[in-house]
Image (cartoon, rainbow, N blue to C red):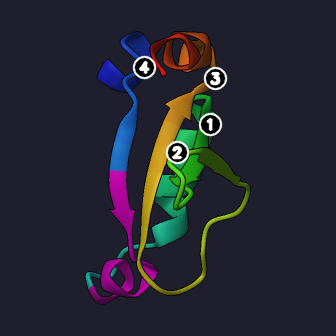
């Protein structure tokens, strides 16, 4: 409910292999957030948001998920 009502910006580590070891599907979380209107980004070395359009298949990634409805608020805070 919090994700739907408050649309917080999420900072999280996405590591598909670790999620699979727990017997879970890493694409499930990605899909759930996308269905709620979230778009995914990573930070460039210069601190800029770079869109991530597909879930990484491997490795470890620090990602930021921003709800499309909250993007205007985020842009104004930068």
User: Given this view, does label 1 or label 4 mark the residue nearer the observer?
Assistant: 4
Which quadrant holds the N terminus?
A: top left
Residue 56 appears left or right of 77:
right
Q: Does the magenta stretch mainly form a helix, a strand or a loop?
A: helix
Q: Which residue is mark 1?
A: 35
Residue appearing at x 54%, y 53% in the figure: 46
Residue appearing at x 26%, y 81% in the figure: 22
- Residue at far front of view: 46
Give the vertical position of 48 relative to 13 (above or below). Answer: above
Per the image, is 67 magenta?
no
Q: Which residue is mark 2?
A: 32
| Image spot of residue 75 (x, y percent) | 57, 18
For the residues labelled 3 and 1, the Cα–Cα distance comes to 11 Å
The answer to which of marks 3 and 2 sits earlier in the sequence is 2
Pointer 2 with pointer 1, Cβ within 8 A: yes
| Image spot of residue 51 (x, y percent) | 69, 49
The answer to which of marks 4 and 3 sits earlier in the sequence is 4
Tell me, yes or no, if residue 1 can be seen here: no
User: Given this view, does label 3 or label 1 mark the residue nearer the observer?
Assistant: 3
Per the image, is 15 magenta?
yes
For the residues labelled 3 and 2, the Cα–Cα distance comes to 14 Å
């Amino acid at each position: 409910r919090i994700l739907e009502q408050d649309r917080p910006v999420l900072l999280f580590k996405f590591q598909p292999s670790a999620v699979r070891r727990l017997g879970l599907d890493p694409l499930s979380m990605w899909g759930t957030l996308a269905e709620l209107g979230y778009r995914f980004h990573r930070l460039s070395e210069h601190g800029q948001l770079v869109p991530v359009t597909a879930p990484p298949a491997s490795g470890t990634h620090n990602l930021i998920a921003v709800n499309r409805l909250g993007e205007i608020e985020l842009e104004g805070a930068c």
